[in-house]
Amino acid sequence: MGLVNFAMPAIVMVLADLGFKPSTLGAFSSADTLGFAAGGLAAIAVMRYVSPRVTVAMGLALLFAADLASASFSASSILVTLRSLGAFGGGLAMGACAYVYGLDPERNTAAAVLSSYGLGVIAMTAIPAIVWRWDWHAMFIGLALTAIAVLGFSRYFPSSYRSETTQKQSPSRTSSVPRVLPWLGFGATALFAVALSSFWTYLGRIGSASGLGEQTVSRSLSFAASFGLLAAGLMILAGKRLATKLTIALCAIITAAAVAAAHSPVPWVFAASISVFNFSTAIYVVAAFGLLMRRAPTERFAVQIVGVNAAAAALGPALGGVLIESYGFGVFQLLVMVVFILAAALLWRYSSMGRELVSIESQQSVAGLV
């Protein structure tokens, strides 16, 4: 599913060349994100009736069927419907993945980011070549074959679903603190996803608006993708050592600075800014998930975070488009910077509150022993 997400710009470009209207392209992209969000949120219920292993297999099978069927139709309405069904299957599979991420949240998330960036870079290069060599039907066939290729990994997932199996409940868990804690996490996740998806969607247009050529922008985006790979590799090695509030704060500040510098007519400044943006956001994503899971470490919460992230990401492009049309790129970039900082502030508060909760429970445990 990460491959489809990162390759979506290339897929949209292919469909645009085929004569699809901008409204249809927007519906296609939104169907992908919303379907993924719905699948991620539904994964919990599905895993209860079957298992994480079967849920992954079902999701990948649905993704395979939808992509394969897309190669047989050319009507825009059918393609949008099939995209939403395929994304729903991808969301089911990703939800099951999030279920096991809590075992080592930083390294597991970093591995997912690494594979997504890697496959996305390959797809952005391979899709235009496939379409040029054959036609656009082959593009969907290739995506379908990718889903089948990873289906075998489903056997490594748990064969049964365990309900909340982490921290032992204590009296403090019934207070207002635990009830507020998840919502702080959801809010921080949603704000970051909205800012990230909106800026990523219009990054190419920002470069073009600053006077850069299409080829320069394309090369800069390809070059910047390698920094996302580098950051994910670093987090795999570092694990939870970099999943700290300080990392979150630094990444938010660096990301905001990169957003501000992106609207530059100087090619190397544009390339450097989006490279830094990819590097800092990749580290932020991994560190944030680690903090979220270590303060409220339940499998259900992990799956919910994935769903909230996808749902919020679906709103980003639409909100960004309205802001750009109404106020221009300058105001848009300023608001994106503010939202990134606000998301980090909420996550900082979430982490501090979670630490306070753990401290309260520890004191109660000691008091009980005395």
Image (cartoon, helix red, strand yellow):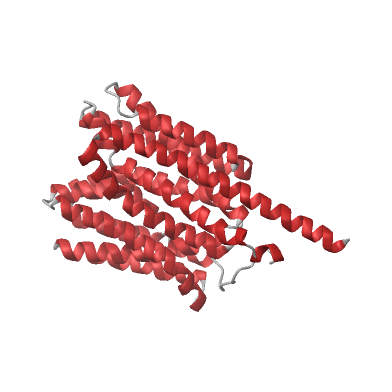
Specify whether 7 is left or right of 252.
left
Q: Tell which residue pokes out farthest to the left in this image.
A: 19
Which residue is found at the position 44% from the left and 34% from the top? 255
Q: Nearer the viewer, residue 21 or 336?
A: 336
Res 180 quadrant in image:
bottom right
Q: Tell which residue pokes out farthest to the front in this image.
A: 176
Res 62 quadrant in image:
bottom left
Q: Nearer the viewer, residue 319 or 176?
A: 176
Q: Nearer the viewer, residue 354 or 57?
A: 354
In the displayed structure, 234 sits above or below 166; it is above
Q: Is residue 106 visible?
A: no
Q: Is residue 75 visible?
A: yes
Which residue is found at the position 56% from the left and 52% from the top? 292
Res 367 quadrant in image:
bottom right
Which residue is found at the position 33% from the left and 54% from the top? 314
Residue 335 drawn at (x, y percent):
35, 38
Residue 30 drawn at (x, y percent):
27, 56
Residue 262 drawn at (x, y percent):
33, 29
In the displayed structure, 211 sits above or below 205; it is above
Which residue is found at the position 60% from the left and 48% from the top? 351
